Amino acid sequence: MARGKFITLEGGEGVGKSTNLIFLHDFLKVRNIPVVITREPGGTPLAEKLRALLLDKNGESIAATTELLLMFAARAQHIRHVIEPALAKGEWVLCDRFTDATYAYQGGARHMELSTIAWLEHLVQGSLRPDLTLLLDAPAETGLARARERRGEADRFEAEKRQFFEDVRLAYLKQAEQHPERIKIVAADRPLPDVQAALADSLSALLR
Ligand code: TMP
């Protein structure tokens, strides 16, 4: 049986990941592709517990190294119990964030060494990389305004200062520059139908 495809959706806060994840899911479903939808950090009971620890802004302060290791600990669990088994069964996996988020948030915004992240990526993932990454890109300010409208209380990341999200955005764009064959930048600060037309084009190319 053919191995499934691994697709990740990335972007800063408030770029419309949730809405577009549903769009991507439906796009594949109507084409009779078996698809598993999941997220990071999270996706298994243990990884969801780690997520809750990572997003909690009321606990003890979390060192950047701890944060990085918890992200990869959650990822190791997620790959072992959800992502790899699904791909092996021929299912496509649609994941809300993956390791590009670590390069953007822990690398770009928390200033962890990129070589350390690359080392952990190798340890945890071996050769596993997404087949396609869709990066929803919008100015940090636009995304933050949308995120504020939508949410109640901010989590530990959302409570960061604006510069943090500028750094996240720049690091994402740098990742895209370094992996142009895998990461497609989709401008997210335009009407939803235009964003979704671009997403559909990228998925169609992968289907071919
Ligand atoms: P979410 O808001 O998209 O559900 O993601 C939760 C937060 O976790 C988000 O603010 C980005 C952050 N994050 C990282 O800092 N590093 C990572 O590797 C991942 C997957 C998420």
Image (cartoon, rainbow, N blue to C red):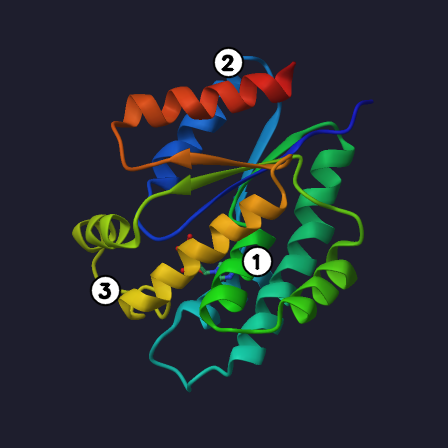
Is ligand 1 less than 8 Å from the beta carbon at label 3? no
N-term-proximal mark, 1 vs 3: 1
Q: Which residue is mark 2?
A: 30
Q: Nearer the viewer, residue 67 or 132?
A: 132
Foreground residue among 139 and 101: 139
Q: Residue at x 56, y 60 (%)?
A: 103
* Mark positioned earlier in the residue sequence (3 or 2): 2
Residue 184 on image: x %, y %: 52, 34
Q: Quadrant of residue 32?
A: top right
Examine the image and state in which quarter residue 133 appears: top right
The answer to whether the residue bearing label 1 lies less than 8 angstroms from the nearest atom of ligand 1 is no
Callout in the foreground (1, 3)? 3
Residue 156 in view of the camera: yes
Q: Is residue 129 above or below residue 27?
A: below
Count the marks: how many? Answer: 3
The secondary structure type at the circle numbered 3 is loop
Q: Residues within 10 Å of mark 1 (few under 14, many from 20)?
A: few
Q: Are marks 1 and 3 in contact (CB under 8 Å)?
A: no
Along the polypeptide, which appears first: circle 2 or circle 1? 2
In the rendered structure, are the residues bearing label 2 and label 1 in contact, judged by CB atoms less than 8 Å apart? no
Q: Is residue 110 above or below residue 134?
A: below
The circle drawn on residue 153 is 3
The residue tagged with tag 1: helix, strand or loop? helix
C-beta proximity under 8 Å, tags 3 and 2: no
Disc 2 residue type?
Val
- For the residue labelled by badge 2, is the local secondary structure a helix, a strand or a loop? loop
Q: Amino acid at mark 1?
A: Pro
Mark 3 belongs to which amino acid?
Glu
Disc 1/disc 3 C-alpha distance (Å): 23 Å
Q: Is 81 left or right of 35, judged from the image as shown?
A: right
Label 1 belongs to which residue? 45
